[in-house]
Image (cartoon, coloured by chain):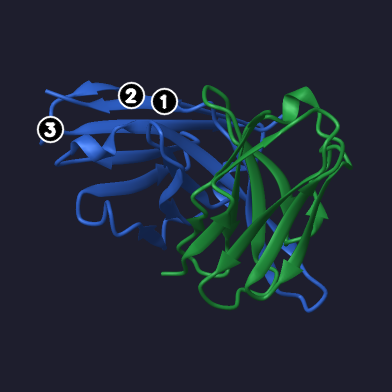
Chain colours: A blue, B green
């Protein structure tokens, strides 16, 4: 079955860097877009970034643009999130999620996040 | 960016109740609207996709409706495992956005 496992979380000081990994199994990894989503304590879900199946398209939320970099290695079935210049407000549980696509009656693709990992906690604190 | 606004932010209900959560988009998004359930410590769970399509394995007491800018998630006959936080999410834009969440707790 589809499985996504995040790793790399931990405690880091403000201004420092941390790298997260999302290891996938149970499906043809190179055929799917993967997203990162986070949830800070007491806050809601926040979309962070996405990377397309062939790495040709990468998009970021304004809150992380210029500081975070998403990448993938299809030979290792893994997506990465490199987080630089970390701030206290980046403290959150980070989830990776795999896109699924439904084609509506007009043939238009509706994307949704069907499969999620259990998350990895990042705490930015001095 | 497309802004998603949910109401209410919190809701108290009892087992067996019917509850409705609304989600409004800042622009028309057609049916590009999904609903998730989340409990801290667990992975978010997809409930509804494309505004009204029930994800496989999700109980039929969950339903979604709406199109354009206004959407609803309805839970009939609440069960103990339904007390959680619910989020809408638009996929009209490549940059997904979530609503701020509706926390459903026990009255």
Q: Tell me, yes or no, if residue A100 can be seen here.
A: no
The secondary element bearing badge 1 is classed as strand
Please state the chain letter of the residue tagged with numbered disc 1 in the rendered image: A
Q: From the image, tell me which residue sits under label 1.
A: A120
What residue is rendered at 70% in x and 69% in y? B31
Gap in Å between the C-alphas at discs 1 and 2? Answer: 5 Å
Residue A14: mark: 3
Q: From the image, tell me which residue sits under label 2.
A: A9
Looking at the image, is mark 1 or mark 2 earlier in the sequence?
A: 2
Residue A72 in the image: x percent, y percent?
40, 44
Determine the residue located farthest toward the front in the rendered image: B107
Report whether A58 appears left or right of A68.
right
User: Marks 1 and 2: CB-CB under 8 Å?
Assistant: yes
Which corner quadrant of the image does residue A73 belong to? top left
Residue A57 in the image: x percent, y percent?
41, 63
Work out whether B72 lies above or below A104.
Answer: above
Mark 1 neighbour density, 10 Å: few (under 14) some (14–19) many (20 or more): many
Work out whether B34 lies above or below B43.
Answer: below
What residue is rendered at 72% in x and 29% in y? A1
Work out whether A46 lies above or below A56.
Answer: above
Of labels 2 and 3, the one closer to you: 3
Report whether B9 appears left or right of A120.
right
């Amino acid at each position: 079955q589809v499985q996504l496992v995040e790793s790399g979380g931990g405690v880091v000081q403000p201004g420092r860097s941390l790298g997260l990994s999302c290891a996938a199994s149970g499906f043809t990894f190179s055929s799917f877009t993967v997203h990162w989503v986070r949830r800070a304590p007491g806050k809601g879900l926040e979309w962070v970034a996405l990377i397309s199946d062939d790495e040709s398209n990468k998009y970021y939320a304004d809150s992380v643009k210029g500081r975070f970099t998403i990448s993938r290695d299809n030979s290792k079935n893994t997506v990465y999130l490199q987080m630089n210049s970390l701030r206290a407000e980046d403290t959150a549980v980070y989830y990776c999620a795999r896109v699924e696509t439904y084609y509506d009656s007009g043939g238009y693709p509706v994307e949704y996040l069907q499969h999620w990992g259990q998350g990895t906690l990042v705490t930015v604190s001095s | 960016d497309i802004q998603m606004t949910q109401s209410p932010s919190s809701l108290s209900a009892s087992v067996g109740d019917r509850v409705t959560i609304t989600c409004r988009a800042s622009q028309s998004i057609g049916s590009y609207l999904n609903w998730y359930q989340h409990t801290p410590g667990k992975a978010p769970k997809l409930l509804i996709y494309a505004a009204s399509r029930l994800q496989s394995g999700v109980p039929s007491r969950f339903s979604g409706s709406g199109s354009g800018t206004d959407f609803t998630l309805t839970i009939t006959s609440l069960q103990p495992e339904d007390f959680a936080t619910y989020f809408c999410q638009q996929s009209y834009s490549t940059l997904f956005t979530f609503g701020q969440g509706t926390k459903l707790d026990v009255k």
